[in-house]
Amino acid sequence: MTEVGLFLVLFVALFVGWAMGRKNPTKKNKQAKKSIPTDYFRGLNHLLNDQHSEAIDAFVDSLEVNSDTFDIHLTLGNLFRKKGEIQKAINIHQNLLARPEISQREMRMVQLELASDFMSAGLLDRAGRLLLNMASTSRKSEFQPKILALLVDLYEFEQSWDKAIQIGSELIKETPTKKEIKRLAHFHCEMAQELQKKEQWKSAFQHYKDALEVDSSCVRASIGAADVLNSQGRYRDAIKELKHAAEQDPEFISIIIPKLKECYQKVWGSGGYIKFLQEQNQKKPSTALIMALVQHYMETDKDYAEMFLVDQLRQHPTIKGFKELISLQLADSQGYNQQHLVVLFELIDQLVQAKHKYQCRQCGFPGHQLHWQCPSCKNWGVVKPIHGLEGE
């Protein structure tokens, strides 16, 4: 068992001893000894024999449920759940609910923990029924935000986006935290993506707009709205959405550039597109912007394109940019110089392919694909393209 687990056992043992000592403060030692439950001595025996799990069970059995021990029972149940011993957590919390002496407030506290137990055990139907019943009977109570938050967690896990949106909207009225606002916006985006697959463009577009109403900084909603407009042939409107996305978060410029180029080519040619690239590169240079500009300059003046790239690399060195420079020089090289450049290009290319493109700004989880919800910490909108020498 870890040090934390051993500390937990010792803490429980000390608390049980304290609770019983408090219950019998004036009795003689002989009388106190008689009042101590045999489960307490059994727990101590397990503890001495390094049987820590059995020790905790024995200490729990020795604790009567009353106003002094309610919190420790609740805490132990939570700790069992976090350790993965879900059935023990359920047993403790259900035992608490069966006690007629607990107050209405204490009952709500236990029900919330029991709902969390059910969710951890995968008993989603039971968790849902319990939470919905609490939501209908605990309106305007101190527990309502927690109840709604657990329901949102449940519907998010089930990917029931319509229900998640409904409850999430109620939750941000109760507690309009930045995290919950961002999460609700992404629920609208998830719903929009499902509608896009069914080619229900109008409804999909509305959900992206609803996402922006909830969170005006949701770059995913602006990009998604542009995709819908592009599919409908509304290229000018799509360009406006993509430019807005670049203003919301310039870190997503590598996602925006290819979509913007496609739209510009269908309406106005490359003039406005190049102007956009130049302006963005002055504000916040990135490999994606530099590469896009180099590709454009290559069409008319290869020497200028190479000079531009070298100058940009001096100011903002990146591995991807260095790879592009080698690629440009390969075309004009011959003999051994070309062979050496080929080897160098292949090595750099392998390095680029091995490097992750995206990283969660919350927990640091890296990946090669963009996930709007981090696969590790489960937060929304925290995964972004990597910048710096190894990224953009």
Image: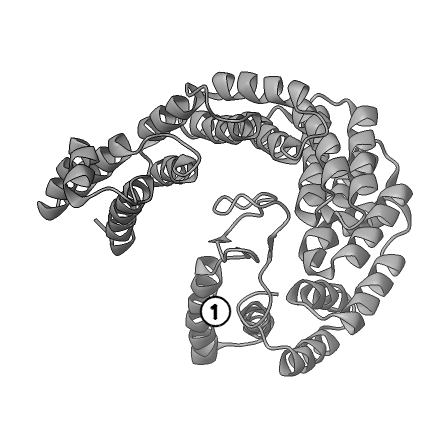
382 left or right, relative to 109: right
Where residue 318 sits in the image (x, y, percent)? 57, 72
Q: Is residue 278 above or below residue 116?
A: below
Residue 280 place in picture, x, y as percent: 79, 66
Q: Is residue 337 above or below residue 204?
A: below
> Label 1 amino acid?
Phe
Using the image as rendered, state which of residue 226 and residue 137 is in the foreground: 137
Q: Which residue is mark 1?
A: 345
- Residue depicted at x 41% and y 18%: 98
Which quarter of the figure is the C terminus placed in? bottom right
Q: Nearer the viewer, residue 136 or 122?
A: 136
Determine if residue 371 is in view.
yes
Q: Is residue 197 visible?
A: no
Residue in the image at 70% along x and 49% along y? 178
Position of residue 286 relative to residue 22, above or below, is below
Q: Badge 1: few (under 14), some or many (20 or more) residues near its Cα, within 10 Å?
A: some
Q: Which residue shows up at 15% across the image and 32% down it? A: 38
Left or right of 60: which side holds 126?
A: right
In the picture as drawn, the residue positioned furthest to the left comes out as 49
State the image coordinates of residue 180 (x, y, percent, origin top left).
Answer: 68, 42
Instruction: Establish if 376 lies above or below 95.
Output: below
- Dot 1: what SS? helix
Place of residue 249 in the rendered image (x, y in percent of width and height, measured from the top left): 74, 57
